[in-house]
Amino acid sequence: MAARVYRPVGEGPHPVLVYYHGGGWVLGSLDSHDRGVRALTKATGCVSVSVDYRLAPENPFPAAVSDCLVALEWVSQNAGKFGGDPNRIAVGGDSAGGNLAAVTAIAARESGPGLAFQLLIYPVVDSDLTRDSYKTFANAPMLPGDRMTYFWEQYVPDPGRRTDWRCAPLRAQDHTGLPPALVIGAGLDPLVDEGRAYAEKLRSSGVSVEYKVFPRMTHAFFQAPGLLDDARTAADLAASALRAALRIDL
Protein backbone atom coordinates (compact mmCIF):
# COMPACT_ATOMS: atom_id res chain seq x y z
CA MET A 1 0.00 0.00 0.00
CA ALA A 2 1.18 3.51 -0.84
CA ALA A 3 -0.12 7.00 -0.23
CA ARG A 4 0.52 10.46 -1.62
CA VAL A 5 0.50 13.54 0.61
CA TYR A 6 -0.57 16.92 -0.77
CA ARG A 7 0.24 19.99 1.30
CA PRO A 8 -1.41 23.40 0.95
CA VAL A 9 0.35 26.75 1.03
CA GLY A 10 0.85 28.28 4.47
CA GLU A 11 1.87 27.28 7.94
CA GLY A 12 0.26 24.28 9.58
CA PRO A 13 -1.03 22.41 11.27
CA HIS A 14 -3.71 21.95 8.62
CA PRO A 15 -6.79 19.73 8.76
CA VAL A 16 -6.41 16.45 6.90
CA LEU A 17 -8.56 14.86 4.20
CA VAL A 18 -7.93 11.14 3.73
CA TYR A 19 -9.12 10.36 0.20
CA TYR A 20 -9.94 6.97 -1.33
CA HIS A 21 -10.10 6.83 -5.13
CA GLY A 22 -12.86 5.22 -7.15
CA GLY A 23 -12.67 2.53 -9.81
CA GLY A 24 -14.95 -0.28 -8.71
CA TRP A 25 -12.32 -1.63 -6.28
CA VAL A 26 -10.62 -2.93 -9.46
CA LEU A 27 -9.32 0.19 -11.22
CA GLY A 28 -7.92 3.55 -10.22
CA SER A 29 -4.68 4.73 -8.67
CA LEU A 30 -2.93 7.68 -7.11
CA ASP A 31 -2.32 9.01 -10.62
CA SER A 32 -5.88 8.59 -11.90
CA HIS A 33 -7.18 10.89 -9.15
CA ASP A 34 -4.16 13.14 -8.79
CA ARG A 35 -5.73 16.21 -10.40
CA GLY A 36 -8.90 16.00 -8.32
CA VAL A 37 -7.10 15.59 -5.01
CA ARG A 38 -4.77 18.45 -5.87
CA ALA A 39 -7.76 20.65 -6.60
CA LEU A 40 -9.44 19.78 -3.29
CA THR A 41 -6.21 20.52 -1.44
CA LYS A 42 -5.92 23.94 -3.05
CA ALA A 43 -9.60 24.79 -2.59
CA THR A 44 -9.84 23.72 1.04
CA GLY A 45 -6.45 24.37 2.59
CA CYS A 46 -6.38 20.78 3.84
CA VAL A 47 -3.50 18.43 3.77
CA SER A 48 -4.80 15.61 1.57
CA VAL A 49 -3.62 12.02 1.80
CA SER A 50 -4.59 9.92 -1.21
CA VAL A 51 -4.54 6.20 -0.44
CA ASP A 52 -3.51 3.55 -2.97
CA TYR A 53 -5.27 0.54 -1.45
CA ARG A 54 -4.98 -2.99 -2.83
CA LEU A 55 -7.27 -3.81 -5.76
CA ALA A 56 -9.42 -6.79 -6.70
CA PRO A 57 -9.55 -9.40 -8.09
CA GLU A 58 -6.03 -10.16 -6.87
CA ASN A 59 -6.94 -8.72 -3.47
CA PRO A 60 -10.67 -9.21 -2.85
CA PHE A 61 -12.74 -7.92 0.06
CA PRO A 62 -11.83 -7.09 2.77
CA ALA A 63 -8.28 -6.20 1.66
CA ALA A 64 -9.21 -2.67 0.54
CA VAL A 65 -11.08 -2.01 3.79
CA SER A 66 -8.10 -3.18 5.83
CA ASP A 67 -5.75 -0.91 3.88
CA CYS A 68 -8.00 2.10 4.25
CA LEU A 69 -8.28 1.63 8.01
CA VAL A 70 -4.54 1.19 8.35
CA ALA A 71 -4.00 4.35 6.31
CA LEU A 72 -6.41 6.33 8.48
CA GLU A 73 -4.70 5.12 11.66
CA TRP A 74 -1.30 6.03 10.21
CA VAL A 75 -2.52 9.53 9.32
CA SER A 76 -3.90 10.01 12.82
CA GLN A 77 -0.62 8.94 14.42
CA ASN A 78 1.70 10.78 12.03
CA ALA A 79 -0.21 13.89 10.95
CA GLY A 80 2.15 16.22 12.74
CA LYS A 81 5.07 14.97 10.66
CA PHE A 82 3.58 16.40 7.45
CA GLY A 83 1.86 19.50 8.80
CA GLY A 84 -1.47 17.90 9.61
CA ASP A 85 -3.77 18.31 12.58
CA PRO A 86 -4.73 14.90 14.05
CA ASN A 87 -7.77 16.46 15.72
CA ARG A 88 -9.32 17.58 12.42
CA ILE A 89 -9.52 14.63 10.05
CA ALA A 90 -12.10 13.95 7.32
CA VAL A 91 -12.51 11.00 4.98
CA GLY A 92 -13.75 11.16 1.42
CA GLY A 93 -13.93 9.30 -1.83
CA ASP A 94 -15.81 8.78 -5.08
CA SER A 95 -17.74 5.70 -6.18
CA ALA A 96 -15.94 2.67 -4.70
CA GLY A 97 -13.80 5.18 -2.81
CA GLY A 98 -16.99 6.66 -1.40
CA ASN A 99 -17.89 3.17 -0.27
CA LEU A 100 -14.56 2.86 1.52
CA ALA A 101 -14.92 6.30 3.09
CA ALA A 102 -18.38 5.40 4.42
CA VAL A 103 -17.14 2.06 5.76
CA THR A 104 -14.12 3.72 7.34
CA ALA A 105 -16.32 6.30 9.04
CA ILE A 106 -18.44 3.57 10.61
CA ALA A 107 -15.38 1.60 11.75
CA ALA A 108 -13.70 4.72 13.16
CA ARG A 109 -16.75 5.48 15.28
CA GLU A 110 -15.89 2.39 17.32
CA SER A 111 -12.10 2.35 17.24
CA GLY A 112 -11.07 5.91 16.39
CA PRO A 113 -9.76 8.25 15.34
CA GLY A 114 -12.60 10.72 15.71
CA LEU A 115 -13.63 12.09 12.32
CA ALA A 116 -14.99 15.54 11.57
CA PHE A 117 -16.60 14.87 8.20
CA GLN A 118 -17.24 12.39 5.39
CA LEU A 119 -17.37 13.39 1.72
CA LEU A 120 -19.23 10.72 -0.28
CA ILE A 121 -19.28 11.30 -4.05
CA TYR A 122 -21.76 9.00 -5.85
CA PRO A 123 -20.83 6.27 -3.35
CA VAL A 124 -21.46 2.55 -3.70
CA VAL A 125 -23.23 1.75 -0.44
CA ASP A 126 -25.25 -1.38 -1.14
CA SER A 127 -24.98 -4.67 -2.98
CA ASP A 128 -28.61 -4.66 -4.16
CA LEU A 129 -28.40 -4.43 -7.96
CA THR A 130 -32.19 -4.51 -8.46
CA ARG A 131 -32.96 -0.92 -7.48
CA ASP A 132 -34.97 1.14 -9.95
CA SER A 133 -31.96 3.24 -10.93
CA TYR A 134 -30.11 0.09 -12.00
CA LYS A 135 -32.99 -0.67 -14.37
CA THR A 136 -33.48 2.90 -15.58
CA PHE A 137 -29.78 3.49 -16.22
CA ALA A 138 -28.79 -0.03 -17.23
CA ASN A 139 -27.13 1.39 -20.34
CA ALA A 140 -25.87 4.62 -18.84
CA PRO A 141 -22.59 6.02 -20.15
CA MET A 142 -19.55 5.84 -17.88
CA LEU A 143 -21.11 3.19 -15.60
CA PRO A 144 -23.70 0.83 -17.12
CA GLY A 145 -25.37 -1.49 -14.67
CA ASP A 146 -23.62 -4.63 -15.84
CA ARG A 147 -20.26 -3.06 -15.07
CA MET A 148 -21.27 -2.76 -11.44
CA THR A 149 -22.20 -6.45 -11.53
CA TYR A 150 -18.69 -7.16 -12.77
CA PHE A 151 -17.09 -5.00 -10.09
CA TRP A 152 -19.01 -6.74 -7.32
CA GLU A 153 -18.03 -10.15 -8.71
CA GLN A 154 -14.38 -9.16 -8.57
CA TYR A 155 -14.48 -7.46 -5.18
CA VAL A 156 -16.73 -9.89 -3.27
CA PRO A 157 -16.82 -13.11 -5.32
CA ASP A 158 -19.03 -14.89 -2.78
CA PRO A 159 -22.54 -13.37 -3.04
CA GLY A 160 -23.26 -14.59 0.47
CA ARG A 161 -20.73 -12.12 1.88
CA ARG A 162 -22.23 -9.07 0.16
CA THR A 163 -24.57 -8.34 3.07
CA ASP A 164 -21.57 -7.54 5.27
CA TRP A 165 -21.74 -3.84 6.14
CA ARG A 166 -18.02 -3.52 5.51
CA CYS A 167 -18.78 -3.82 1.79
CA ALA A 168 -22.37 -2.55 1.90
CA PRO A 169 -22.43 0.21 4.56
CA LEU A 170 -26.14 0.90 4.05
CA ARG A 171 -26.70 -2.46 5.74
CA ALA A 172 -24.92 -1.53 8.97
CA GLN A 173 -27.23 -1.96 11.96
CA ASP A 174 -26.42 1.44 13.46
CA HIS A 175 -25.63 4.72 11.72
CA THR A 176 -25.90 6.95 14.77
CA GLY A 177 -22.95 8.98 15.93
CA LEU A 178 -21.30 9.19 12.53
CA PRO A 179 -19.57 12.37 11.32
CA PRO A 180 -21.51 14.93 9.26
CA ALA A 181 -21.68 14.10 5.58
CA LEU A 182 -22.03 15.57 2.14
CA VAL A 183 -23.44 13.03 -0.32
CA ILE A 184 -23.18 13.99 -3.99
CA GLY A 185 -25.16 12.08 -6.59
CA ALA A 186 -25.30 11.93 -10.37
CA GLY A 187 -28.83 11.84 -11.74
CA LEU A 188 -28.03 9.51 -14.67
CA ASP A 189 -26.24 6.87 -12.65
CA PRO A 190 -27.21 3.35 -11.53
CA LEU A 191 -25.92 4.33 -8.07
CA VAL A 192 -28.19 7.34 -7.58
CA ASP A 193 -30.92 5.48 -5.66
CA GLU A 194 -28.57 3.93 -3.13
CA GLY A 195 -26.76 7.22 -2.58
CA ARG A 196 -30.07 8.90 -1.81
CA ALA A 197 -31.03 6.02 0.48
CA TYR A 198 -27.76 6.39 2.38
CA ALA A 199 -28.28 10.11 2.87
CA GLU A 200 -31.78 9.39 4.18
CA LYS A 201 -30.46 6.66 6.48
CA LEU A 202 -27.85 8.99 7.94
CA ARG A 203 -30.39 11.78 8.41
CA SER A 204 -32.92 9.49 10.09
CA SER A 205 -30.11 8.35 12.42
CA GLY A 206 -29.48 11.90 13.59
CA VAL A 207 -26.43 12.59 11.42
CA SER A 208 -26.12 16.02 9.82
CA VAL A 209 -26.30 15.42 6.06
CA GLU A 210 -26.32 17.56 2.95
CA TYR A 211 -27.48 15.69 -0.15
CA LYS A 212 -27.06 17.14 -3.61
CA VAL A 213 -27.91 15.37 -6.84
CA PHE A 214 -26.95 16.77 -10.24
CA PRO A 215 -29.78 15.57 -12.49
CA ARG A 216 -28.00 15.97 -15.84
CA MET A 217 -24.78 14.26 -14.81
CA THR A 218 -23.47 10.73 -15.31
CA HIS A 219 -21.19 8.75 -13.05
CA ALA A 220 -17.63 10.12 -12.81
CA PHE A 221 -18.67 13.70 -13.67
CA PHE A 222 -16.88 15.03 -10.57
CA GLN A 223 -13.58 14.26 -12.28
CA ALA A 224 -14.22 16.74 -15.10
CA PRO A 225 -14.43 20.28 -13.64
CA GLY A 226 -12.49 21.60 -16.60
CA LEU A 227 -15.30 20.52 -18.93
CA LEU A 228 -18.55 20.56 -16.98
CA ASP A 229 -20.22 23.43 -15.14
CA ASP A 230 -21.93 20.96 -12.80
CA ALA A 231 -18.59 19.37 -11.96
CA ARG A 232 -17.21 22.79 -10.98
CA THR A 233 -20.30 23.44 -8.88
CA ALA A 234 -19.93 20.05 -7.18
CA ALA A 235 -16.24 20.65 -6.51
CA ASP A 236 -17.02 24.06 -5.00
CA LEU A 237 -19.73 22.48 -2.84
CA ALA A 238 -17.35 19.78 -1.61
CA ALA A 239 -14.65 22.33 -0.79
CA SER A 240 -17.08 24.59 1.03
CA ALA A 241 -18.48 21.72 3.10
CA LEU A 242 -14.99 20.55 4.04
CA ARG A 243 -13.88 24.04 5.05
CA ALA A 244 -16.96 24.46 7.25
CA ALA A 245 -16.64 21.07 8.92
CA LEU A 246 -12.91 21.37 9.46
CA ARG A 247 -13.05 25.01 10.58
CA ILE A 248 -10.83 26.37 7.84
CA ASP A 249 -10.70 30.10 7.25
CA LEU A 250 -8.88 30.80 3.99
Image (cartoon, rainbow, N blue to C red):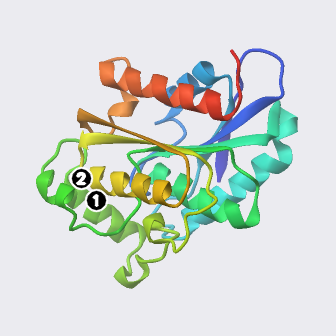
Q: Nearer the viewer, mark 1 or mark 2?
A: 2
Percent from the top left, x then y, of residue 11?
A: 83, 18
Residue 206 or 250: which is nearer the viewer? Answer: 206
Extreme residue toward the bottom, this view: 160
Residue 233 or 97: which is nearer the viewer? Answer: 233
**Number of other residues with Cα within 10 Å of mark 2, as a class: few under 14, some 14 to 19, many 20 or more:** many
Specify the quadrant of the image occupied by residue 112: bottom right
Residue 61 or 131: which is nearer the viewer? Answer: 131
Task: State left or right for residue 177 relative to residue 36.
Answer: right
Calculate the distance from the C-alpha at mark 1 to the C-alpha at mark 2: 9 Å
In the picture, which quadrant includes the N terminus?
A: bottom right
| Residue hosting label 2 | 190
Mark 1 or mark 2, which has the lower sequence index? 1
| Residue hosting label 1 | 148
- Which residue type carries mark 1? Met
Percent from the top left, x then y, of residue 226?
A: 37, 17
Q: Is residue 193 above or below residue 84?
A: below
In the picture, which quadrant includes the C terminus?
A: top right
Q: Is residue 5 above or below residue 170?
A: above
Can you see residue 225?
Answer: yes
Percent from the top left, x then y, of residue 75?
A: 76, 46
- Which residue type carries mark 2? Pro
